[in-house]
Image: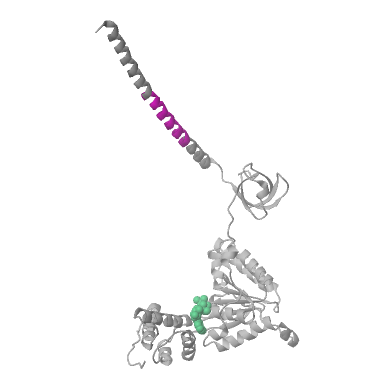
Amino acid sequence: MSASSAARRRSTGDYMDLETQLRVLEERVRFLSRVKVELERKLEEARREMYKLMSPPSIEATVLEVIDNERVLVKSTTGPNLIVKVSKDIDIKKLRPGMSVALNNRGSTIIEVLPRKVDPLVKAMEVEKRPDVTFNDIGGLSEQIRELYEVAVLPLKEPELFKEIGIEPPKGVLLYGPPGTGKTMLAKAVARESNAVFIRIVASELVNKFIGEGARIVREVFRYARDNAPAVIFIDEIDGIGARRADLGTSGDREVQRTLLQLLAEMDGFEPLSNVKVIAATNRLDLLDPALLRPGRFDRLIEVPLPDFNARIEILKIHLRKVKKRGRIDLEKIASLTDGFSGADLKAVVTEAGFFAIREGRRAVTMKDLLRAVDKVKDRKGGKQAVGGGGIIM
Ligand code: ATP
């Protein structure tokens, strides 16, 4: 091999080595650029996070009015109404009165439109245009029904009658008695019989669940009732705001006080013969603030007691009306075994009996099912002696 051809081969080899190295280096450059892009992205993310952590809190406000192409009047939650500018990211044309927005910490600019909040009023108030309960669905309370008819249904249906005779019906009726005895049913039936809309609020929830909103909800509920009259406002668990207070030490107590005062103001503010009736319910009459029971407020008290023997038979009949039965059903026997049961307990007996029948593959309820159900409900209530099922003709 000549010297020149050896040199040529060596230089060809060197050239190939260099080319390989170059390719490797190019690949590394590409790889490192990808790493660089990724690290830059992470850095930007970290910067943004740091900016968020360091930025001062923004102020919540409600849009009152869009003044022109640049300025908006808002009510800030810190108190005053403010005229503010709008950040470039927000289309001022899309702002509407009532919208919730965030202002920068100086309160000078809208920086974000906040998602719409569900008004607590909507959650607190249960409305039924035509409740499905009639007085016929309520057992053993004929005296209470008669009284409610006179003091609530008649004034809503025939106010002229009262005007002609010259008497004023009570503005508010208070139903009191143990849980599950039919107080809600009575209020619903009053609404139904007087073709009135039924509005229910639970007073204890106003102060526990809707903190800071109790008084406003009371005001709005009365306004809603007036706008949709005739209406029955049913205030359940009124002791939640109407209990006697020892002192007003905590802010929670003051919240209860504000809500109660608003209720009293609403009660004082409408006429006895207006087409809104207020019915309240409590299990604890002994706890109630006497201010609630003064004339012109809840001045008609109606007791709704646990059903006696005959009332229990009536209630059982009502709940068994639609139930398919087989064999002889001895209602007197069931009534005698259910002393101390409320209407709700008796309804539970019928439902449980239905489940016993289903579990055994039957399509109808028997007396035996009902007796077992009495045992079960009694156990659940914490009753001591269980009832026996023997000796009953079915
Ligand atoms: P609470 O004090 O716990 O609110 P309440 O007195 O308002 O109870 P309701 O809610 O009216 O009781 O009754 C609960 C259920 O019990 C009713 O839906 C109904 O099925 C049954 N019930 C209660 N009392 C009677 C009754 N007198 N006649 C027929 N059913 C009744």
The quadrant of the image that shows the C terminus is bottom left
Residue 134 magenta-highlighted = no
- Tell me: 250 left or right of 21: right
Image x and y of residue 36, in percent = 44, 31
Between 231 and 29, which is closer to the camera in this rendering? 29
The image quadrant of residue 10 is: top left
The span shown in magenta is: 24-42
Identify the residue at the far top of this view: 3
Q: Residue at x 42, y 82 (%)?
A: 349
The image quadrant of residue 132 is: bottom right
Color theme of the render: one colour
- Tell me: 336 left or right of 215: left
- Residue 52 seen: yes
Residue 40 magenta-highlighted = yes
Image x and y of residue 161, in percent = 72, 86
> From the viewer's perspective, is residue 262 above or below residue 378?
above
The image quadrant of residue 246 is: bottom right
Between 289 and 80, which is closer to the camera in this rendering? 80
Image x and y of residue 326, in percent = 39, 89
Q: Residue at x 35, y 18 (%)?
A: 18
Number of marks present in the image shown: 0
Is the magenta region chiefly helix, strand or loop? Answer: helix
> From the viewer's perspective, is residue 21 above or below residue 335?
above
The quadrant of the image that shows the N terminus is top left
Image x and y of residue 260, in percent = 61, 69
- Residue 258 seen: no
